[in-house]
Amino acid sequence: MARDVLIQKINDTLIAGVESEQAVVYLLVETRKLADRDNYGDPVLRMFCNWVVHTDLANKGEGSTLLLTAVDKEIDLLARKFFAVALLSDDVLRSQIASPYFK
């Protein structure tokens, strides 16, 4: 029965809309309670639930490592795309500048 109460609280919060810091904190605390009861161990969800009430996560968990690894990969991918476009643009620019002189 307690599980149903938690689900109802989470559902009610989502229906009302999460538009304030208080609503975010409440939603994640209730979500953490439900996850603990159901032995749901997603590390990223746990990290966010912890982060919302502990601004300094002294004990880095698996979730923060997974999240930071994913962010690092995305940044690396974006950087590679940016530099590839920049290099391509330089090559195109060079060919356009040189072409009138080397015909």
Image (cartoon, rainbow, N blue to C red):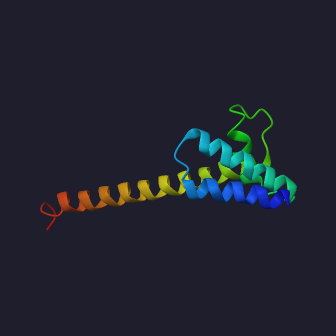
Instruction: Tell which of 14 and 85 is nearer to you.
Output: 14
Picture coordinates of residue 78, whole percent (x, y): 48, 55
Instruction: Tell which of 41 and 81 is nearer to you.
Output: 41
In the displayed structure image, the side of residue 78 where residue 51 appears, left or right: right
In the displayed structure image, the side of residue 71 where residue 55 appears, left or right: right
Identify which residue is drawn at 73% across, 45% down. Answer: 29
Identify which residue is drawn at 81% across, 36% down. Answer: 59
Q: Find residue 10 and report its image quarter.
A: bottom right
Identify which residue is drawn at 24% across, 62% down. Answer: 95
Counting labels gives 0
Identify which residue is drawn at 61% across, 50% down. Answer: 72
Q: On the rendered image, what quadrant is the C terminus found in?
A: bottom left
Instruction: Tell which of 32 and 56 is nearer to you.
Output: 32
In the displayed structure image, the side of residue 88 where residue 41 appears, left or right: right
Instruction: Tell which of 54 and 81 is nearer to you.
Output: 54
Picture coordinates of residue 2, whole percent (x, y): 84, 56
Picture coordinates of residue 90, whole percent (x, y): 30, 55
In the displayed structure image, the side of residue 68 where residue 3 appears, left or right: right
Q: Find residue 91 and report its image quarter.
A: bottom left
The single residue placed furthest to the bottom in the displayed view is: 103
Picture coordinates of residue 99, whole percent (x, y): 17, 64
Q: On the rendered image, what quadrant is the N terminus found in?
A: bottom right
